[in-house]
Amino acid sequence: MSENKTVRFIITRQGSADATPYEETFDLPYRPNMNVISALMEIRRNPVNAKGETTSPIAWDMNCLEEVCGACSMVINGRPRQSCTALIDKLEQPIRLEPMRTFPVVRDLQVDRKRMFDSLKKVKAWIPIDGTYDLGPGPRMPEKKRQWAYELSKCMTCGVCLEACPNVNSKSDFIGPQPLSQVRLFNAHPTGEMNKAERLEAIMGDGGLSNCGNSQNCVQSCPKGIPLTTSIAALNRATTIQAFKSFFGSDQI
Amino acid sequence: MAENREFFWRKLHSLLGVIPVGLFLVQHLVINHFATGGAESFNKAAGFMEHLPFRIFLEVFVIYLPLLFHAIYGLYIAFSAKNNVSQYGYFRNWMFMIQRISGVITLVFVAWHVWETRIAAAFGAEVDFNMMADILSSPFMVAFYAIGILSTVFHFANGLWSFFVSWGITVTPRSQVISTYVTIGIFVALSIVGMRALAAFI
């Protein structure tokens, strides 16, 4: 009975960054509570494809295994998501695994998510607290604000929103929803707010906020349920005000 | 294009789509609606618009320049998207794609419409009820105009929804949902105005 049950995987592979992608099929014995990562580990233990040929183990990224690090994102049955929380029992078979092609593919299912970390630098997604002397404690944050800002802090830079966005592609230099929502997070912080204008000016640059076309796929796809489109709309308001401020010249901050 | 001008161009594109191009569209549809009152009623209304003082300046700054910019920059925006409704079949993603398709259809329609009416007028044709009745005597042109008007009205109504988001007016999900219903209402209302006028010329 259950010992005969198998799970079929169709995995898009490529040997190196510029190699041609191809598909390889694997049949694995079913085990209760399997997820995509445990299946990939099983293939790594015994890299034999459905035709019975020995092949190379599949390359993929993983780290925390509990959907907080974002490293194991891939396209599973057409949807980008984390492979650690993709339970086999809840997936339609055959299970198709592909890399998130919005990012440069390193090998097999492994992609280079560097562009998102570069964007975080570009938008200054941090709070400058260093000084030449002890600056003391910062201002307090209202509890209500802390609660919604906490939701934004759940972003794990997994790349699913960029993969889902029709405006993030090779023809455009749009930075995508992920760094934008972080600008709202750091601008909401009472100390971070002191550099609010710098972050807003950064997302008013080329490839920034205004490249959003409101398809709202990001908010539908975010595994952490971050209100990305609310962040984008809130930033639209903030940048509109910022643009008036810098052009007509009221107090500069 | 100079560095970091994109924010300005995009905002300008969004603004011009509503003011003045969208407002002109509404006014144009309303004037056309006089056709439902007969040839004389339409000719009187069209004649009033035609004899507005400084007409060429009004046309250039309220219609031609904003429309040209919106159209050309819009084409760039439309073709830099990689549509993915087959994977992500959400309502807003469909609207995103249809907004781009309707924009291109509208551009083709408007280009032909301007050629046939305003440019013909510049070469001495008389723009009146008979001109339109003549154009719409062919069933093909009736279909072309019907599709063109519906596409234009959709592009305006849905563009208005995006305008409210892009300028940070509708921020909360709830306000965006209500804005969806309001803009659907605008689409239906303007479509009725447009279709009634079209039917009056047949």
Image: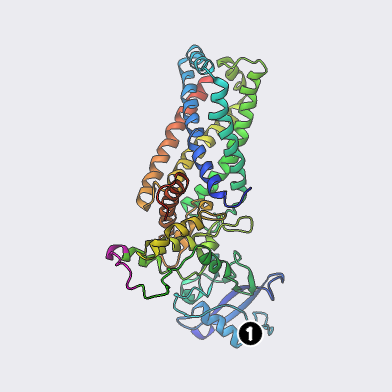
**In the displayed image of the protein, which residue is found farthest to the top?**
B40
Magenta region includes residue A144 = yes
Q: Is residue A226 visible?
A: no
Tell me where residue A234 appears, x and y as whole percent: 40, 54
- Chief secondary structure of the magenta span? loop
Residue drawn where x is 45% and y is 41% of the image: B160
For this orientation, the residue located farthest to the left is A143
The answer to whether B199 is drawn above or below residue B75 in the figure is: above
Q: On the picture, is B60 further left or further right than A135?
A: right
In the figure, is residue B85 to the left or right of A232? right
Q: Where on the picture, by quarter, is residue A33?
A: bottom left
> Disc 1 designates what residue?
A47
Residue A94 percent across, percent down from the top left: 57, 71
Residue A227 falls inside the magenta stretch: no
> Residue shown at 57%/49% (left/top)?
B5
Q: Chain of mark 1?
A: A
Q: Indicate the secondary structure of the residue bearing disc 1.
A: loop
- The magenta region covers A136-145
Position of the C terminus of chain A, as image quadrant, is bottom left
Would residue B35 be visible to someone looking at this image? yes
Where does the image place residue B188, in percent across and percent down from the top left?
Answer: 43, 35
Report x, y in % for residue A90.
46, 72
The residue positioned farthest toward the front in the image shown: A132
- Amino acid tagged 1: Pro
**Vertical comparison of A240 with B151: above or below:** below
Q: Residues within 10 Å of mark 1 (few under 14, many from 20)?
A: some
Q: Residue at x 43, y 61 (%)?
A: A195
Please tell me which residue lies in front, A239 or A45. Answer: A239
Rendered residue at 39%/62% (across/down): A194
Number of numbered discs? 1
In front here: A165 or B38?
A165
Residue B124 or residue A125, whichever sits in front: A125
